[in-house]
Structure formats: C-alpha cells, structure tokens
Image (spheres, rainbow, N blue to C red):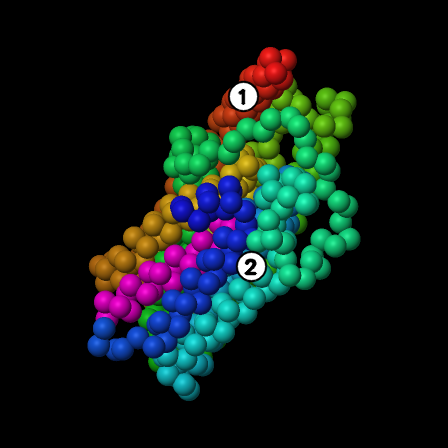
Amino acid sequence: MLWGPVSDHVGRRPISAACLLILTLSCIGLALVPTSDFWLLILLRCLQAAGSASTIAIGAGVVGDISTRAERGGFYGVFTIGPMVGPAIGPVIGGALSGSLGWRSLFWFLVIAAALCFVIIILFQPETLRSITESSRANIPIIYKPVLPIIGRGCKAPPPPSSEPKIKVPKNPFALFLNPDVDVLLFLSAIGCAVYYGVIATISTLFVTAYPHLNETTIGLCYLSIGGGMVIGSSLTGRILDKEYRRYKAKAEAHFGEGTLNLAHEANFPLEKARLRLMPIYIIVMAACSAGYGWAIQTRVNIAVPLILHFIFGYTGIAIMNVASTLMIDLVPGQSSSVTACNNLIRCTLSAVLVSVIELILKGIGIGWTYVLLAGILVCSVPAVYLSIKIGPKYRVKRLQKREDALARLIEVDGANKTEA
C-alpha cells in the first residue's frame, strides 16, 4: 500500500530497485541472525516481506503501462506466473537446501536470487510510467535510464510531450475502496486466494499424515502439481481473456460502426462481461476440486488423486485471481499499481486469517468437511460475478465522465491563464 502508489508517481524502475535492495539486505540479516534472538528473526521477516511483496504491485503497474485492454490479459497472465507459482516451487528448493545444507542456506539462496534481480533491474529495465516516458528524453533523470538500454531498443521514439494539461493521479490508494465495482472484484480475488492458501498451507502436514512414506524432499516435490497447474492456467487464461475481449470489441465496433469506443459507447460496451463470462465456471470447478481433495486425503486414496486435483485446483485458482486483477487494472489503468496493492492487502489479509485458523477447523470438523466448507465459501462468491457484470458499466462510465470533466476544466483554466499572460 506504500510502494505501489509511490511507483504510480515516482516511477517503476527506481522503486523496483529499492524494494529488491531491501529484500536482499533483509535476507542477509536473516542468514546471520542468532538463533537466540527470535524477535529479530520476526522483525527481519517483516522487512523481507515489505521488500518482496511490493514487487507484485509494481509489476502489475508495468503491465498496465505497456499494455492495452486487448492484450492486457496475456501480459498479466505471463507476469503472474512468477509471484503465484513461487509458493509452489519454493518448498521443492527449500526442502532440498534445508535437508542438505541447513536452514540458513535458504536465506543465502534468497540473497543470491534477490541480488541477481536487483542487478537485472539496474542493467536492463527501462522506465514504463507514462508520465515520465512521455516527457522529453533529454529531461529524463539518469535513475530512469537502464545501464544497457536493450529492452525496447527497436520501438518507436515516444511522441513529443503534449502541452495539454494532465490530470494528477490520486496519491491516496485507499480512495479506490470507494468504488463499489472495484470492491466486488477485490472480494472475488480475496476468496479465491484465501481458499488457495487454505490448501497449499496444509499440504505438508496433511500429506505426511496420509502418506507416511513421504520424506521432506518428496513432500516438496508434491507442490509441483499445483504449481504446474498455475503455470499453465496463468498462460492460457491470459490468452482466453484477450480472445474474449477482442470478440466483444468486434461486436461493439460492428454495432456502433466506429473503430474506437468513445464515452457514449462505453456505457453499452460489456467490458465486465467480456472479462468475467467464464468466471463462474472457474469457481465451480475449483470448489469441486476443494471438496474432492479433502475427502481424498481423509480416505487416503492413491496419492495420484490429490495431485491431479491439485493441478486442476491450481489452474482454476490462478484463473480466478488473474481475471479479477486484469479487470481491476482495466477499470483504473492510471492507478494499476495502487489497485494491485489494494488487491494484495485484502487477499493477503483474508488468506492470513484463514491460514491461522485452518488447523483449528481441521481438528474441529475433520479434513473432508473442512474442504467442503471452503468449497461452499467459493460457491457463495458466484453471485458477486453477476453483480459485477450488472453494476460495473455504471461506475466505469461515471469515472470516465468525471475524468473528462476534470480534463475539460484544466484545459479551460490553462487557456484562460495563457490568454491573461
């Protein structure tokens, strides 16, 4: 909630580098922390999270900067492969390192990985924030210029800066919660993410009980199934989103007889439907996998069954989160990092609450009924999809109208100032 909005104003490149530097330094501290100072371990873990989690919001901001609605689903799908699959492949690496070199090796591994990312940012990443890139190249400070300007070298030069006044991006990200259509999407994303972590957080404890022959390393390998589902799901969902959008846009253009959609047409363009049409299917399939997974573990069926369900669960889980996140960026493209930060705040808070009580629920009602309960929570979110489709156009057009009115006032004031001068 801090770094995301800051990157909407200061720029993506310097904030990305700063966050990765914080992550690197905190990992060094964690690798060296004395085992007697548990408070210091917790403090450094919080600092580590502050450096790493913000890169998700900043990365989403970059996607919003460089993509249009017609291609945003594919871009976002590729981007989320990293942050969402990380928790799935992390246990594989962690199990191998801790089993052979001890727990401190985990943090030294993260030091190397984070430092490598920091160097890549400094060397190659160009600035993408439009308020900076659309200014004159000669006026861009050195912190926004990569050492090796390879990315985007073949692209056309940016247009000369416009003399037309620009609307300032709001600095307070919490104001985004005042948009009901955005709130519905935050709810959908949070439910999908919480249930996903309700499964992934208990894999090790449930599998070691249900399948005693597994050791630390082989349990880590079991995470690859859900990770594989997320990789494929993220990529395919992005392509499906782009295809659906182009199909609905072609229908709208054929109806209006124009190449572009103006404000008058925007009210009748079903953007929300184009993005959310398949969402109920994803939710129902994910719920079925959740319920089936719980009873498969409780009855200790062949391990292939829960692993197959993991794959489908990962596919549908990332699909739900990506669809909601892509539509959120569509709705407030100028605040893509801020709205993603809001998304992280809500879904990570709800996920943390569920993970903190999941063991109590498992002990209270059993494994099978616990995941039936999570499936029920998922199914209860389906009406929110149709609510978003119904109310979305109204609030979307209202924001666009407000923006156009503000721009008209700025132009009028700017013209009056020039005449007076």
Provide the residue designation for mark 2: 81
> Image check: 206 left or right of 331?
left
Count of numbered tags: 2
Magenta stretch in the rendered image: 38-60
Residue 122 rendering spot, x and y as whole percentages: 58, 61
Residue placed under numbered mark 1 in the picture: 406
Query: What amino acid is at disc 1?
Result: Ala
Dot 2 or dot 1: first in sequence order is: 2
Quadrant assignment, res 267: top right
Q: Residue at 33% x, 64% y: name it.
A: 45
Residue drawn at (55%, 37%) of the image: 334
Query: What is the distance, in whole Å, between disc 2 and disc 1 at their CAs?
Result: 38 Å
- Residue at far front of view: 421
- Element at badge 2? helix
Q: Position of residue 340 (x, y in %)?
A: 47, 45
| Residue 351 visible in this rendered orientation of the protein | yes
Q: Secondary structure at mark 1?
A: helix
Q: Nearer the viewer, residue 413 or 260?
A: 413
Out of 166 and 30, give the one closest to the viewer.
Answer: 166
Q: Quadrant of residue 242?
A: top right
Q: Does the magenta segment cover residue 138?
A: no
Where's residue 130, x and y in %?
A: 61, 41
Q: Residue 375: x and y, percent? A: 39, 51
Q: Does 194 sit left or right of 11 as displayed?
A: left
Q: Is residue 421 left or right of residue 369?
A: right
